[in-house]
Image: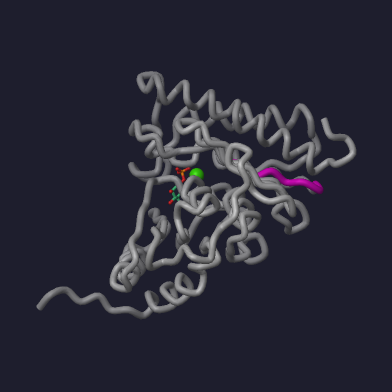
Amino acid sequence: MNAANPALARFELAKTAARSAGELALDYFRHPERIRIEEKVNAQDMVSQADREVETLIREAIGAQFPDDRIIGEEFGMDDREAEYTWVIDPIDGTSPFVHGIPAWCVSIALIAGGRYVAGVIFAPCANELYAAFEGAGATLNDRPLRLSESDTVANGLVGVGGSHRVPPEELSRFVHTLVQSGGMFIRNGSGALMLAYVAAGRLVAYYEPHINAWDCLAGICLIREAGGWTNDFLGEFDLATGGPVITAGPGAREQLLALIEKSATVKIEGPS
Ligand code: IPD
Ligand code: CA
């Protein structure tokens, strides 16, 4: 353990815990007959025992080394303790693709402190890709540094779009309509965290979801910021328990994305007459 730098010691733990968690989840993914699915809010919003076991594994790994830290997780909620460091974890982001046998899911672990994005780790087991970022030290993908480019724009790249039952369908439609009408294109793979990691890696030029939970996005936000991209200040603006919009882009796409979001709020969709 890195006793001299407590944040760095936690970053190291986040990486090993994400890998172990991903391996446990991958074992379930490869044996779908063992996955027991339950509905959460509706039939599109689900959870499985794999999500709970994976979150338990991460919580135990954190608790063993840093028992006083606060933990917020998608499946077991948050405690009210005061702590310098808070972990925000999504054991399996992309539960829907996960249970449907689609390899677009990941483990997401964020570390925050005093309103700062200290570390973000996302592990995508099916691709064996570990995305990791530490405050002020940059972001990496499998140890290779990530640096976003000015030349990737909405016009020549892909914009990730997220949606859920929490967002009015018209709002999503208006954004997608405005984007496509302006010459851009959207993609949605079912894992907000993984698409945010793709923004950090320069695979997507931007990601927008009108409402997302903290465990889905904080690790991705840290990755994007450390890779040289821009994000709204989710931590500064929204409550950890209730979430809010996530707006992120590489340096070449930021202005276009913000203009598209603004325009989409008022656009009227008309079909062919
Ligand atoms: C969901 C996914 C989805 C996003 C939703 C999330 P889950 O998380 O990240 O892509 O659009 O906002 O709730 O249910 O797969 O952990
Ligand atoms: Ca999630």
The segment highlighted magenta reads 83-89
Magenta stretch contains residue 85: yes
Residue 32 vs residue 193, the one in the foreground: 193
Quarter of the figure with residue 261: bottom left
Residue 73 vs residue 190, the one in the foreground: 190
User: Measured along the vertical axis of the image, is residue 18 above or below residue 224?
Assistant: above
Magenta stretch contains residue 50: no
Q: Is residue 77 visible?
A: no
Quarter of the figure with residue 81: top right
The quadrant of the picture occupied by the C terminus is bottom left
Q: Where is residue 27 in the image (x, y as percent from the top left)?
A: 47, 21
Q: Which residue is drawn at 32% across and 73% down?
A: 182
Q: Which residue is drawn at 46% across and 61% down?
A: 208
Residue 240 vs residue 30, the one in the foreground: 30
The quadrant of the picture occupied by the N terminus is top right
Q: Where is residue 241 in the image (x, y as percent from the top left)?
A: 60, 53
Q: Which residue is drawn at 62% across and 60% down?
A: 228
Please state the total of marks drawn on the protein image: 0
User: Measured along the vertical axis of the image, is residue 113 above or below residue 272?
Assistant: above
Q: Can residue 271 be seen in this view?
A: yes
User: Measured along the vertical axis of the image, is residue 201 above or below residue 29?
Assistant: below
Q: Where is residue 267 in the image (x, y as percent from the top left)?
A: 32, 79
In this view, which residue lies farthest toward the left? 273
Q: Where is residue 112 in the image (x, y as percent from the top left)?
A: 71, 50
Q: Residue at x 78, y 56 (%)?
A: 114
Q: Is residue 188 left or right of residue 14?
A: left
Q: Is residue 175 left or right of residue 88?
A: left
